[in-house]
Amino acid sequence: MKLWGGRFRKETNQMVDDFHSSISFDKRLYPQDIRGSMAHAKMLRRQGILAAADEEAIQAGLQGILEDMKAGKIDFPPESEDIHMLVEQLLTERIGDAGKRLHTGRSRNDQVATDMHLYAKDTCDDTLALLRELEETLLFLAEKHASDVMPGYTHLQRAQPVTLGHHLMAYFEMFKRDMLRVRRCREAADVCPLGSGALAGTTYPLDREYAAAELGFAAVSLNSLDGVSDRDFLLDYLAAASIGMMHLSRFCEEMVLWSSLEFAFLTLDDGFATGSSMMPQKKNPDVAELIRGKTGRVYGDLTALLTVMKGLPLAYNKDMQEDKENYFDARDTYLKCLHVFTEMLKTASFRVGNMQRSANAGFANATDLADYLVKKGVPFRDAHAVSGRMVAHCLEKGCALDDLTLDEMRSFCPAFEEDVYGTISLAACVAARKLTGGPAPERVLSAVQAGRAWLTQQE
C-alpha cells in the first residue's frame, strides 16, 4: 500500500501509476530532498516533537541513502511515485518506525517547494559561474582588440567604423545584465516554504526560521497558501534564461555570418566546426547554429510553465508537477550553451585585416566626411548631400573616399583642405569617438577596466 493509501479501498490503476509518477525526472532532486529532510528532523527534535534517538537514526539513515544515491547504488523505480516517497520508503526500510516519524508536520506540497527553491538557488550559482567565465573571456578579447577597426552595421549594411573591442564590449554589457537578472532570480528563490504544510501550515510548534537557517535560506515565506503554490521563482529563471539565450543567439548569428567567405571576419577552430558528408570544402558553424536553434527550446519552456500556471486556483494543484521538466530542460540547455559558446569563442580567430579592409571599402567614414565639412562652416544638410554625392562618385570609380585627390574633393565642395585626409582615416574616425560609451580605443580600454572592477564586486 502507498504511504498515503489509508483511505483507499483498491489499488491505483497501473496506467494511472505510470501517468502520475514523476520520479523519472524529479530524481535529480535527491540531494535537495535529503538536505531538507535532515533540517526538518533536526528542527523537530529541537522543538521536542521528535525523540533524540529517532532523530539520530533518521540523520544516519538519510546520510546513508545520500551516499548510496551518489554512488549509483539505488534504483529509482516508477512505482515509488516521486523522490520524496522513495527516500521515505528507503529510510523506513533501513531504520524502522523512526523513519515514519520524519514526515511529522510536513506535506509533500511544502517539501517539493522547498526542494525546488534549493535547486533553483544551486542553478543560479552554476549559471553565474558560467556567465562570469564568458564575461572574463570577452574582457580579454576586447582588450586585445581595442584598436582593431571594423565596420559597425545598421540594417546589416556598413555604417560607421568601430573597433572589434568595442563590438565585443557590447556583448559584455548584455551578459552583465544577464548576471544581474540571475542574481535577482537567486534572491527570489532564497525563501523557504518549509512549514507551510499542505496549504495551511500545521498545529505542531515548528520553528520555521530555524529550519530555514539550517538550509541556508535568507527568509521564510509569509503565507502558507502562497508558499506551496508559488512558482514565480522558477518563471523568473526561465525568463532570465530566455533573454540570456537570445543574447547568445545574436552573438551566434554574427559568428555564423563572420565565418562565411562573404564576410571572412572569423575563423572557427576545427574543434568547434563540422564538415559535410558530400562537399569536402565545407566548414560549417554547427555549434553556433545549434545554440541559435536551442534558444527557441528555452522560450518554449518558459511559455509552457506560464501556461500551466495561468489558470490555477490556490493552493497546490497536480498541474504544478509539470514545472520540473520545463525548468530542468531550460536549465540544462542554457548551461550547456553557455559552456560550449565560451569555449568556441576562446578558440576562434578574428581576421582583423579583413575587418579593416571591409570598413574602408564600405565608406564607413562618410559621416565623418560630412562632419568635417560642418566644422568648416557648411550646414549639416548640405554637408550630408556632398558626402552622399562623393560616395556615389567613388562607387562609379571603384575607390574609397580617401583615395580621391584634394582637387577631386574640392570639385564637390571648396571647403575641403589638406587636413581632410587625417580626419577621415579610419583610425582617426574611431579615435575621435571618445565620448563615454564610444569606440575610441581609450574608451574601450577604460570600459574593460570598469568591467573587471564590476566582476570583482560580484564575487
Image (cartoon, grey):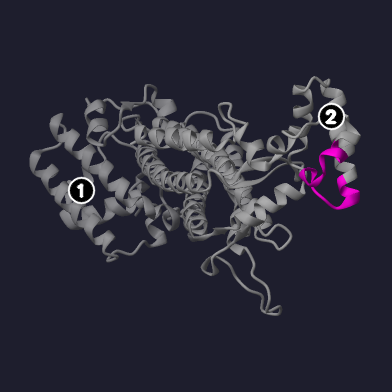
Q: What residue type is labelled 1?
A: Gly
Percent across and percent down for residue 375 are 74, 22
Mark number, residue 90: none
Viewer-nearest of labels 1 and 2? Answer: 2
What residue range appears in magenta?
A: 394-409
What is the quadrant of the C terminus in the image? top left
Task: For label 1, count other residues whose C-alpha is less than 10 Å away and answer few (under 14), some (14-19) or many (20+).
Answer: many
Dominant SS type (magenta): helix
Residues 249 and 19: in front is 249
Percent across and percent down for residue 69 are 28, 60
Q: How many marks?
A: 2
Q: Can residue 211 be seen in this view?
A: yes
Residue at position x 91%, y 50% from top? 396
Taking the image as shown, residue 435 lies to the left or right of residue 229, namely: right
Residues 183 and 219: in front is 183
Callout 1: SS: helix
Q: Can residue 231 be seen in this view?
A: no
Q: Is residue 406 magenta?
A: yes
Percent across and percent down for residue 394 are 86, 46
Taking the image as shown, residue 135 lies to the left or right of residue 387, namely: left
Q: Earlier in the sequence, mark 1 or mark 2?
A: 1
| Residue underneath mark 2 | 384
Q: In which quarter of the image is residue 121?
A: top left
Q: What residue type is labelled 2?
A: His
| Residue underneath mark 1 | 99
Taking the image as shown, residue 353 lies to the left or right of residue 132, namely: right
What is the quadrant of the N terminus in the image? bottom left
